[in-house]
Structures are given as structure tokens and as C-alpha cells.
């Protein structure tokens, strides 16, 4: 498959990130590596979306701290970014609504409809909605945009229409009322947003009443998920315990763990315990800029968070 015929993917990870760990970043890297190895996908970007403060999880530090720690953790990455939209809403948002927000946002930025796992022939990026001159209209293959340019151009356009919230000057959010018009057009590619998660989230789908079945249908059926298991979890067994997961099994991509990089290091709980006990192994869980910020801000110094 050529670059333009492969499915272009943006990985979206939702969670507390309390705090963000090396394991969280490792999940993105492992997922991208696995998807590229299939020969069917090109991952052009990753989005980290921390949960709203009203989620109510015990020990959850304010979003201003979690957003900053996430930004510090990805500051050296050229493809993963932190999105504060979820934190800026009036109340907690479901995972389904976060996925739909980013799908709709990409649709507005690109001026096109995004594809999903159930309709691979959905109109793809590059089909203009009016007669406005398109960007990258030169058909010379040597000048066609690379996937890196695509993600870069998207991020650049997002930045141009962003507003800065008070006391959050290092983070921006997109004004959904902005008239984006036909600012961006690309060569024809298929683009999907996939939810990136651990096997714990996959297992939570099997808990009766925890998820709305309609939300599960959208998350797994319309978007699709990429699962990076923790500690050798039997994902096959988990999927067989849920009718929705069984139904959309083909939309679930399982990334095999690396014995040299066990996903147990993704645990925010273990990192908080290490911080509370002054355990030097905290460096195994957290990158140094995040550790420095935690110490400077006096976070997680007691059992309540």
C-alpha cells in the first residue's frame, strides 16, 4: 500500500493522568509501532485528553497541574500533544463525547468528513465542499504533503484559531464558533480517530451498568480502539465477556506487550505511592520534568493525593 492509500490515524487517550507516567507515553509509542507494522495504518498524531476535575476520583489533583505535567511529559515529542478541551468544560464529559468532539473538530479544520471503522469508503480528507482554491493542489507526487506535514498543518491551524484561558497561558483550546471556512485542504487520504487504552478500560466494558451500551457502540463500533494490555492480561477472554466487544471484535486492535517494557509502569497509583514513601523507584514511573514539577508543587505528598 502507498502512503496515500493507508488509513491515517490519530490516537486519542482519555484518562486521569494523575500523574502521567512513562507508561502512558510508552503506550502511544507501542501502538504507533504496531499499527505501522501492519502495513495498513500511518499514525500521524496523538492526543492526550485529561479528565475533568468533576470526575470525582479520590486524590485527583486539579486539572491545571495534570495538564502541566502532561505537557512536560510530551515536550520532546513531535507527534503527541495535550488537549485541554475536556478539562475546560463545565462538567465531566463521557469518553464518547470526547471522541465525537475531536472528530467534529478535525472535520471543521479539514473541511471534510472523517472516516470510521464501519465505513472505510466515507468521504475522505481532500474533497472540497466549494470552489475555494485548495492547499496542496499540485498533483506532482514530489510535492504532495507528507503525513508529518499534515499533522503539522493541522496543529498550526488549530493554534491560529485558539484562545488562551486565564491562568492557563501554556495551553490553548479551539473556539468552536470560529469560522474555519475552507482554510485547509489535503490530498485524498482516509483519516480515523482511534481510542488508545489499556486492558483495564477494555475490561470495564464488561461491568454491568458502568457504560451506556449506546456509548460503547459508538466507541467500539464507529471509532474503534487500540488496546495495549497490562501484565499479560487475557484480552481475548475480556472481549468474549461483552456482547458489544464480540460484535465489533474486528474494530479492536490489540498491541502485544514487550517483556522489556512491561505496561505495569503505566500505573499512576504506583507512582503516587512511590512519591508518598520517598521511594527512589519513582524514576522508573515518571520522567524527570514531571518529578520536578510534582516536588515543586508539593503534589501527592499524602495518602489523599
Image (cartoon, grey):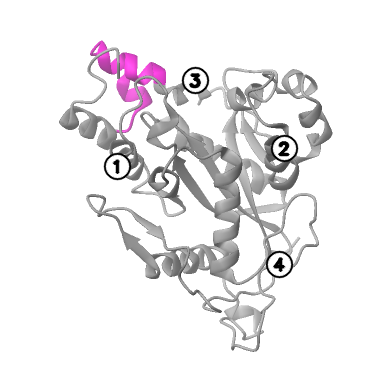
Magenta segment main secondary structure: helix
Q: Nearer the viewer, residue 245 or 101?
A: 101
Whether pointer 2 and pointer 1 mark residues with C-beta atoms closer than 8 Å, the reply is no
Other-residue count near label 2 (Cα within 10 Å), few / some / many at <14 / 14–19 / ≥20: few
Q: Is residue 90 magenta?
A: no
> Residue drawn at (75%, 40%), measured in percent from left and top?
251
Image quadrant holding the C terminus, namely: top left
> Residue drawn at (70%, 35%), measured in percent from left and top?
216
User: Does label 1 or label 4 sit earlier along the sequence?
Assistant: 1
Determine which residue is flagged by label 3. Answer: 264
Secondary structure found at label 3: helix
- Find residue 260 and report its horizontal and vertical position in percent: 52, 24
Determine which residue is flagged by label 4. Answer: 124
Secondary structure found at label 2: helix
Q: Which residues are magenta?
A: 269-287
Other-residue count near label 3 (Cα within 10 Å), few / some / many at <14 / 14–19 / ≥20: some
Q: Looking at the picture, does residue 88 appear above or below residue 235?
A: below
- Find residue 66 and report its horizontal and vertical position in percent: 33, 36
Disc 3 to disc 2, how far (Cα)?
Answer: 31 Å
Left or right, 4 with reference to 64: right
Secondary structure found at label 1: helix
- Find residue 83 and report its horizontal and vertical position in percent: 42, 49
Residue most extreme to the right: 247
User: Does label 4 or label 2 sit earlier along the sequence?
Assistant: 4
Determine which residue is flagged by label 2. Answer: 214
Amino acid at each position: 500500500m502507498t502512503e496515500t492509500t493507508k488509513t491515517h490515524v490519530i490516537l486519542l487517550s482519555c484518562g486521569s493522568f494523575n500523574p502521567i507516567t512513562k507508561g502512558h507515553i510508552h503506550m502511544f509509542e507501542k501502538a504507533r509501532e504496531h499499527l505501522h507494522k501492519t502495513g495498513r495504518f500511518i499514525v500521524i498524531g496523538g492526543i492526550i485528553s485529561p479528565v475533568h476535575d468533576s470526575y470525582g476520583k479520590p486524590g485527583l489533583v486539579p486539572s491545571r497541574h495534570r495538564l502541566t505535567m502532561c505537557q512536560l511529559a510530551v515536550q520532546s515529542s513531535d507527534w503527541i500533544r495535550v488537549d485541554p478541551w475536556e478539562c475546560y468544560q463545565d462538567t465531566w464529559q463521557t469518553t464518547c463525547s470526547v471522541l465525537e468532539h475531536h472528530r467534529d473538530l478535525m472535520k471543521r479544520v479539514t473541511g471534510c468528513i472523517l472516516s470510521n471503522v464501519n465505513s472505510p469508503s466515507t468521504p475522505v480528507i481532500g474533497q472540497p465542499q466549494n470552489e475555494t482554491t485548495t492547499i496542496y493542489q499540485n498533483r506532482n507526487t514530489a510535492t504532495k504533503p507528507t503525513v508529518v506535514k499534515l499533522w503539522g498543518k493541522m496543529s498550526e491551524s488549530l493554534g491560529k484559531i485558539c484562545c488562551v484561558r486565564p491562568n492557563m497561558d501554556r495551553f490553548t483550546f479551539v473556539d468552536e464558533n470560529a469560522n474555519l471556512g475552507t482554510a485547509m485542504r489535503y490530498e485524498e487520504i482516509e483519516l480515523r480517530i482511534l481510542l488508545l487504552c489499556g486492558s483495564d478500560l477494555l475490561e470495564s466494558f464488561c461491568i454491568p451498568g458502568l457504560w451506556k451500551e449506546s456509548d460503547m457502540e459508538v466507541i467500539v463500533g464507529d471509532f474503534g480502539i487500540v488496546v495495549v494490555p497490562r501484565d499479560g492480561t487475557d484480552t481475548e477472554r475480556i472481549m468474549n465477556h461483552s456482547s458489544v466487544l464480540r460484535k465489533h471484535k474486528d474494530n479492536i486492535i490489540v498491541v502485544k506487550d514487550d517483556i522489556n517494557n512491561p505496561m505495569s509502569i503505566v500505573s499512576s497509583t504506583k507512582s503516587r505511592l512511590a512519591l508518598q514513601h520517598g521511594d527512589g523507584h519513582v524514576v522508573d514511573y515518571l520522567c524527570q520534568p514531571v518529578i520536578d514539577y510534582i516536588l515543586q508543587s508539593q503534589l501527592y505528598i499524602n495518602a489523599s493525593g
